[in-house]
Image: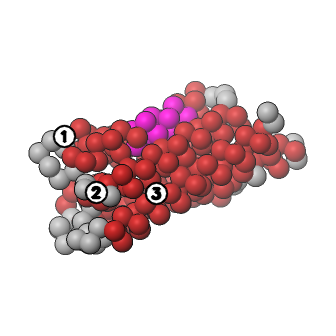
Amino acid sequence: MSKKFIYKTCGVIGILGCVAVLAADLIGIALHEAHNPIRNTISMLAIGKYGWIQDLGLDILAIGFFALAIGLYTWKNSGTKWIISLIILVLISVDLIMIAEHNQYAGRPGDKIHRKLVYALALLFPALVLLTSFDLKSLKPYLKKFSFWIAGLWLVFAPLLPLMPDSINGGYERLVSSLIVIWLGTVSYNLIYAYRKTENT
């Protein structure tokens, strides 16, 4: 199996993960008559008859993160900081799957596990983005500054989420969560063309 094939396959899967989670959110909003995307959180879509759609979207997003970990390991598999970054990628994948499995408890007394998993994601994501930023510069120069911006925006806006009033809680959560999708999609896209870097060296 060539590296070119791995880069393209893992990159495409990463992008599909982004598309799937966005599609799941839009479809869920359309099917849940009482759901207001500005007022109600993403997790609320996982409650009820059509909850499996949101869970499926998160599962595919998790697969996208795992695929990116495989692709980036194939691209580079040395350096302590880099290996730790790839481990965090896998941990985020596992965390997202577990969030999907516990989404049905969102907004209920039994949602402690769900909340802890979300908090774990809130900590793992900026750590991942910051740790990978320097090495991703070799994949594409702009990815270093891009990652800094994503991490900076996350560190500024994510901690404010619990303070948001119920009237805009869902919209604010979607805005912050979009940073995860944007980062994964952008890095995955550049991974698809990583073989060009190899061929030119």
Packing grade of label 3 (10 A; few <14, some 14-19, many >=20) is: many
Numbered-mark total: 3
As drawn, the label of residue 136 is none
Screen quadrant of the N terminus: top right
Query: Measured from the top left, where is residue 148 in percent x and y?
Result: 52, 54
Residue 112, quarter of the rendered image: top left
Residue picked out by circle 2: 49
Indicate the colouring scheme.
secondary structure
Image position of 187 with respect to 40: above or below:
above
- Kindly identify the amino acid type of the residue bearing the numbered disc 1: Lys
Q: What's the distance in space between the residues labelled 2 and 3, CA to CA?
A: 18 Å
Q: Which label sits in the foreground, 1 or 2?
A: 2
- Kindly identify the amino acid type of the residue bearing the numbered disc 3: Val
Image position of 181 with respect to 76: above or below:
below
State which tag comes first along the sequence, 2 or 3: 3
Image position of 129 with respect to 40: above or below:
above
Q: What's the distance in space between the residues labelled 1 and 2, CA to CA?
A: 22 Å
* Left or right placement of residue 147 versus residue 176 in this view: right
